[in-house]
Image: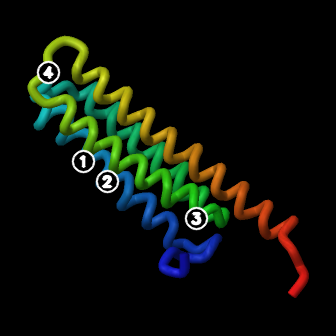
Amino acid sequence: MRWLPESGHATWWRIAGVSAALLGAALLAVRFGIIGQEWNLGNAFMLVLLAVVVSLVVAAAGWFGAKWIWLLSTIGFVSGIVFMAVKSQDTSGWGDLVGFITFMFLSAAGFVLGILVELIAWASRKFGSTHT
């Protein structure tokens, strides 16, 4: 993945900031715009805090060289936001909670899949054939 910065490069922290801003804005837009929940500063703060924490975690993985974790986690975030936005529209009762739990599940699935791919890549480098 040559299009991503090298490990240890400061660009990863800029990526974390942009990712946190976009993810936070998307979570707020879905929660208070699409779902139509009443504005609540406490909930808004928690959603933005969630966006900042997960963005820092996956950017730190990229900074340490685990680019697959960053890429697959980001795919998990995007698919989770899309699913939450689509499935939470015009729902009553538990629909918004189910949408949020699904967002968290898809985000975690992307992170776990990224870890598995990183482990496979590491194992293939470490134990791969050295014969030509």
Question: Which residue matches tag 4?
Answer: 91
The N terminus - image quarter: bottom right
**Secondary structure beneath label 2:** helix
Dot placed on the residue nearer the N-terminal end, 2 or 3: 2
Residue at the spot 49% in from the left edge and 55% down from the top edge: 72
For discs 4 and 2, the disc positioned in front in the rendered view:
4
Dot placed on the residue nearer the N-terminal end, 3 or 1: 1
For discs 4 and 1, the disc positioned in front in the rendered view:
4
Nearer to me, 115 or 56: 115
Looking at the image, the residue that sits furthest to the front is: 132
Q: How is the image coloured?
A: rainbow
Question: Which residue matches tag 2?
Answer: 21
- The Cα–Cα distance between marks 4 and 1, rounded to whole angstroms, is 21 Å
For discs 2 and 3, the disc positioned in front in the rendered view:
3
Residue 121 horizontal/vertical position (percent): 71, 63
Badge 2 amino acid: Ala
Please tell me whether residue 26 is drawn above or below residue 1 in the rendered image: above
Question: Which residue matches tag 1?
Answer: 25
Mark 4, Cα crowd under 10 Å, few <14 / some 14-19 / many 20+, is few
Q: Tag on residue 67? A: 3
Residue 24 horizontal/vertical position (percent): 30, 45
- The Cα–Cα distance between marks 3 and 1, rounded to whole angstroms, is 24 Å
**Secondary structure beneath label 3:** helix
Please tell me whether residue 103 is drawn above or below residue 79 in the rendered image: above
- The Cα–Cα distance between marks 4 and 2, rounded to whole angstroms, is 27 Å
